[in-house]
Amino acid sequence: MNVNELSDQLSSWYGTGASGMAPTQEQWKAVLSRAPEKPLTLINFFKVRDVAGYSDRSDNVSGQEAFARYSAVSIPTMERVGGAFLFVGPYGGTFLGDNEDWDLVAIGSYPNLQSFIDLYTDEGYRAVFPHRTAAVERQKVLICGE
């Protein structure tokens, strides 16, 4: 699949990105256009909801519980495809610059672009991604590396 076809497929699975809960098509294309052999690191900032926002479920669980459902599958799947978490833990504040309000930071590293693609195309990962969406009030994900 070329970059355009893959970004179309990923957008169909994860959404358009209009809500901020998934990448936009342009963001997918940017990351998929990276040098395939270079490592890729993502720094994730999450603000977790008090109560999970399941739109099609009657689950009345906390955002933390919904995020735990997501993490129970996403972490081992990421490791299986070759990725690794360098850090997962509470947000501790800002040392320099404007202070921001986050709950959780996760820094994930992939040895190459294919490892990243393998995570996002994994059927099990796609199945649990709605838990992340339900758990998270807002998020910011930074791309690091060449």
Image: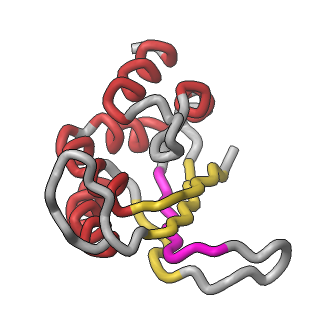
Give residue 91's position: percent from left, percent from top: 57, 80
Name the residue located 21 percent from the left edge and 59 percent from the top edge. Answer: 73
Question: Which residue is nearer to you in this view: 72 or 81?
Answer: 72
Q: Is residue 122 above or below residue 54?
A: above
Give residue 76's position: percent from left, percent from top: 24, 61
Q: Point out the image quarter for the C terminus.
A: top right
Name the residue located 35 percent from the left edge and 63 percent from the top edge. Answer: 135
Q: Is residue 21 above or below residue 88?
A: above
Question: Which residue is nearer to you in this view: 58 or 128?
Answer: 58
Query: Most prominent secondary structure in the magenta stretch?
Result: strand
Name the residue located 29 percent from the left edge and 49 percent from the top edge. Answer: 129
Task: Confirm whether the magenta stretch covers residue 137.
Answer: no
Task: Confirm whether the magenta stretch covers residue 103.
Answer: yes
Q: In this view, does 9 lie above or below 78?
A: above
Name the residue located 50 percent from the left edge and 36 percent from the top edge. Answer: 17
Give residue 57's position: percent from left, percent from top: 16, 52
| Lateral position of residue 21 relative to residue 69, left or right | right
Looking at the image, which residue sits at the far left?
Answer: 58
Question: Which residue is nearer to you in this view: 95 or 64?
Answer: 64
Q: Give the range drawn in magenta.
A: 101-110
Give residue 110's position: percent from left, percent from top: 47, 51
| Lateral position of residue 145 relative to residue 58, left or right | right
Q: Point out the image quarter for the N terminus.
A: top left
